Amino acid sequence: MYDWLQFIGAENKQGNITANECNEIIKKLNLKSFEGGYKVLIMWLPEYLGNEGNKLLKLIEEPPERTVFLLVAENEGQILQTILSRCQLIKVPQPHDNEIKEALISRNKSEEQTATRVAAISEGNYREALQIMQHSDEDWQNLLRDWLNSIMKTGPVAQSKWVDEIGQLGREGQKQFLRYFNHLLQLALRIHVMPQMAENYPDKERDFASKLNRITSIEKQQAIIEELDKAAYYIERNANGKMLFMALTIKIYHIIQDNVVFLND
């Protein structure tokens, strides 16, 4: 959705399917098909149907002859219940990390080591994997180490300098940095709970994730992950990067201040 709003020049607006569009759908589906017999409506993200979506209820419940509705959704819980109850639910699983990796190698001509790391971070989202590849040369780990040390050791001057640095990355770079931090925290959780699940990750990432376990408990890691998710959400909606990361710096300090370990090379 974010990509689409950028493409149509409406990235600061909320996506929606309007009442006029619903009326146009009703009008078109009541026409006779010109060839082929069947009429097929593919609706992307029916979550964006508000109360105006009730206009389509009768059509969905009693469609014209040889008419098929395909509603392609990302979040089942956000669809109007009156529409959802009239649909047959088919869940499409996300690609596995290996499938993402192979696609990056074959389609994007990525190096295997980079593709392996990016596939693990993208969590089954090929679109996100392609976005991350654009920033794959960034040294996220050193940037993260500098941030955490400024939070826990070097203080406000270093924090301000770091915030200026992250502010120069641009919105997409900032999102990928947050995603990388999130990825390492989730790896730290795996090491906590099921160490064998972390064996396939690069040594450098496992080492850093182990150090994160020395800084934080599982509860604190989960709290930081929630803050990172919120920050990524607001970055997508044009939040001021410097203000956001300064606020995030303060929040993370208060989450982990009781357990201080400096992340040296």
Image (cartoon, rainbow, N blue to C red):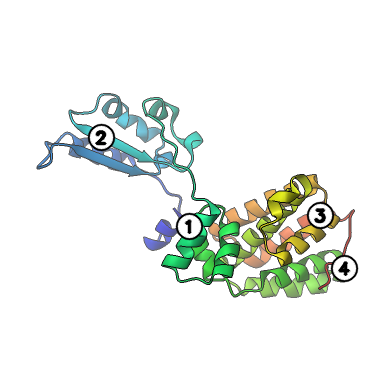
Q: Which of marks 4 and 3 is nearer the N terminus?
A: 4
Under mark 2, the amino acid is Val
Q: Which residue is drawn at 85% across and 64% down?
A: 152
Q: Which of marks 3 and 2 is nearer the N terminus?
A: 2
Query: Where residue 56 sits in the image (x, y, percent)?
Result: 30, 31
Q: Which residue is drawn at 10% across and 42% down?
A: 35
Q: Mark 1 points at which residue?
A: 126
Report whether 27 appears left or right of 188: left
Q: Which residue is drawn at 79% across and 65% down?
A: 148
Vertical side of 151 occupied by 1: above or below = above
Q: What element carries label 3?
A: helix
Marks 2 and 4 in Cβ contact (< 8 Å): no
- As drawn, the label of residue 213 is 3
Q: Which of marks 1 and 2 is nearer the N terminus?
A: 2
User: Between marks 2 and 4, how big is the CA–CA gap?
Assistant: 61 Å
Q: Is mark 1 on a helix, strand or loop?
A: helix
- As drawn, the label of residue 68 is 2
Under mark 1, the amino acid is Tyr
Q: What element carries label 4?
A: helix
For label 3, the crowd category at 10 Å Cα-Cα, with few meaning under 14, some 14 to 19 and many 20 or more, is: many
Q: Name the residue under label 4.
A: 153
User: Between marks 3 and 2, how big is the CA–CA gap?
Assistant: 51 Å
Q: Which of marks 2 and 4 is in front?
A: 2
Query: Where residue 224 sits in the image (x, y, percent)?
Result: 73, 52
